[in-house]
Structures are given as C-alpha cells and as structure tokens.
Amino acid sequence: MSQSNAFAHNIYRRGKNLFSNGALPNWKDARQPCKRVFLSFAVFLFLALGVIGFLPNTQVLAWSEESLDYFDPLDSRSLDERDYVSPNVSSIHFDLVGALAIAAGFDVTDAAIIQAYSEATDAGPLPEENPVYTFDADPANYPEAPPITHVSRSEICPSPETTAPTVTMGSANFDMMECPGCFTDRFGPYGVFFHMPHNSADELVAIHDWAWGLTNTLLGKVTFGYSSTAQFDWQGTANVYETTPCFVQEYHVVDTGSIEPGSLQALGIYLHSLGDSWSHNDCLAAADALDLPFAAHVTVTGATDPLWDCRWTHHTVEFGDATRFPDSSRTFSGVIALYEALIDFAQQSERPIYRPIPLTAEENRIYDALDAFVHASTFLRPGPRRVIADELRRWAQETRETNPLYARERVFLPLFSLHN
C-alpha cells in the first residue's frame, strides 16, 4: 500500500474503530470491549465533519460496518464470553445473516460459512489476523481497461480523443483492496457489480444464478473510468460523475478462485449483494433517473440535490424508528428479502438439516424479531441489534430441534444388500 493511501486507509479505520470502541456511549448490552478514549471521538468527528475531504480513498459503504467487532461464528458461548477481534462487521451482513441461516434450516457449520462470506464480501478475509474465511482469485485474471485510443465515442465517453489515458476506476486498486484475491472487494474491478447492483439480468440476477448453481460461470460487469480528477474510491469527497470525462463498461468472466457456483460461500456473497441492492435502492433509482451508467456514493450540495440518496452518510439513517428514519422501512423490506432468499436456497438444496421456520410462524416470532432488529435502535447503537440477532439464532436453533414440524425427512439406505 502506498504511503498516502496507507495513511488515509489507516486513519479511516482507526477513526471508525476507536469511535466504535467507546467514543460515544455504546448500549450496555452490546457485550463489546469498551475503550472510552476521548481522542477516539475527536478522530472520528474529524472525519465525520468532512475533513476527510482532504484525504484520499474513503470507503464504499452499504449496511456498513458498525461498532461491532468480529467473532468466530462457530462460537456458541454467550455474547459476554466470546472473544472479539478485528475487523468491524455489519449487524445485518454478519450477525443477522447467521441467525437467519439457522432459522432457514442450515446446520451451524454451514450457517457460519454463509454468515462469514456475507460479511467477507465487504471486509475481506476473516478474521483480520490468521483468517479462516478467505478469497483466492488470481489477480492476474482481473480485467484490464482498454487503451483510450481503442475506445469508441459513446454517451458515457463523449470525447475519447481528448481524454487522458489514465485509468482512475475499474483497475484493481491493490493499495485499497482487502486482499489481492478478494474478487468482491469494493475497490476491485467488480466493486460496483457486487456492491451497487441493479436487480437486473446482467447484475444481481447474474450473481443469483451463479450462487444457486444455475450457471457455471459468473459474468461480471466492469466499469472503467478515465482521466478523472478524483479516484473512484474518493466517493465520500467527490462526485465521480462530474470528475470523470469518460466511462467504458465491459463484461468479463469473474475469476472466483476456489469458490464454486452453488456453494455456501457463493450464497453468502449473493446475500451480501442482495442486501446492498436494497440498501442502495434509492441511490440506484436516483442515478438511473439521471441516466448515469452506475450508482456510487458522492458528495451532494443539499437535500434538493438529485443525488441526495447517494450521499456517503446515507447509511446512518437506515435503522431506527420509522417515523424519524423512514429509510428504515426499506431496510426492513431488505432483511425480509434476505430470509426469503435463504429459504429459497434451502428448499432446493440437500444441505439444510431442518425445514425453514416460516416468517410468520410461531406467533410471528421471526417477523417481530426482524422488526425490532431494524427499528429498535439507530445506526450508532448497534448493540441491541447484535443481541436481537443472537436471541433469534438461539430461539431458532431450539425451536427446530424440539418441534417435529421442522424435521426434515431423510432417506436412509441400507448399508448392505439382502439376498434371498
């Protein structure tokens, strides 16, 4: 990582991590280690007030990492007893997906894989040190931008002949990627494809069909940008559409390394992209209304800006009471969509060991838990969400083990043949 990029990346992470570890009051039951250091708040406030505009390489966020540390998803101990390590994780992509995978009938090992790769799509290898859940795509297979001299004039590249050849978007940014083999990385070639997907045949549906094993290859859309005055990963500090005079979009077969179509890892990746599609739904609509080639977080001039829903702080209003935070209603629809996708995969797979618990069964238990998960606390108070997800997971595991309605019929073949 270059010195300037490393500085910005570390400041961003340290600011967010220090803030999360106690700079603002964390809910007591968050069961997280607390380091109440005043400097942490100063660092994060420094970033939040916009001084980050002077630093390169801010991050793409969606149902983003919160003040919650990673834990081993196979750890069955109580929240108080678990070991917590870096990195920060998302309460939806990580905690809730794990709980819903159990409710959908997967065993604890399979649920852990689904949960981990749902989060790793953002965070990269988990945990940060001595990772267990990793990516191993070959960086040599990442697509390269065509020379600007080979680019034809189009609506998204109106004057290639006057465009400088510098590629500022679409190439693998190893200075910012979580790992060279992380093909889903926000700053890799497929960042927009995995994290800002439209619900269309060539984007989210393509990821779905690969994850379900309906196709053996994943064809990903890559957007290259040329001659921008701000790199694509400056999304929090610039408007990439205004600073980039030329875009080119191509489709390439994604090297997914050892992650196979139809696998649990692929399912976790799809669930992340599905969640991001819901999280970015309003931003996608705003970008489409302006005929922009893709959606991205950008700086905005105010609430009347047509790209207001693409502002980089948009994710801070996705949780909480629906009257104060109307965006939370979209989040609620999104988490229901996650569970529906898990049930759909489970019903066509032999891996689950129990039948899924319906959303409104058992006196609306899952539905009500999801409602509380989304609406009971704000973005800055993720502790209650971790507790609700953990309680839901434990309830689902006990319910499916004790209620014969959720037993999954198995065909047992004899170990030997009987002959007359």
Image (cartoon, rainbow, N blue to C red):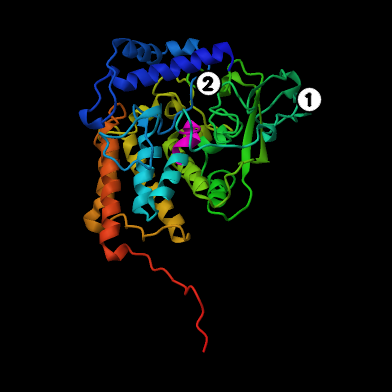
Q: Which residue is mark 2?
A: 239
* The stretch drawn in magenta includes residue 292: no
Query: Percent position (x, y) of residue 323?
Result: 25, 34
What type of secondary structure mainly makes up the magenta span?
A: helix
* The stretch drawn in magenta includes residue 123: yes
Pointer 2: residues within 10 angstroms few (<14), some, or many (20+)? many
Q: Quadrant of residue 104?
A: bottom left
Q: Is residue 322 visible?
A: no
- Label count reads 2
Q: Is residue 287 visible?
A: yes
Query: Mark 1: which secondary structure?
Result: helix
Look at the numbered discs 1 and 2 and tell me whether their residues touch, using CB distance below 8 Å. Answer: no
Q: Which mark is residue 149?
A: 1
Query: Percent position (x, y) of residue 64?
Result: 41, 31
Q: Quadrant of the N terminus?
A: top right
The residue segment tinted magenta is 118-126
x 51%, y 89%: residue = 420
x 65%, y 35%: residue = 138
Q: Is residue 148 left or right of residue 112?
A: right
Q: Is residue 317 left or right of residue 260?
A: left
Q: CA distance from mark 1 to mark 2?
A: 25 Å
Q: Is residue 242 left or right of residue 335?
A: right
Q: Find the residue positioned furthest to the bottom.
A: 420
Query: Percent position (x, y) of residue 252?
Result: 67, 40
- Mark sitting earlier along the chain (1/2): 1
x 75%, y 24%: residue = 148
Q: Which mark is residue 29?
A: none
Q: Find the residue positioned furthest to the right.
A: 149
Pointer 1: residues within 10 angstroms few (<14), some, or many (20+)? few
Query: Percent position (x, y) of residue 273?
Result: 49, 41
In the image, what residue type sits under mark 2?
Answer: Asn
In the image, what residue type sits under mark 1?
Answer: Thr
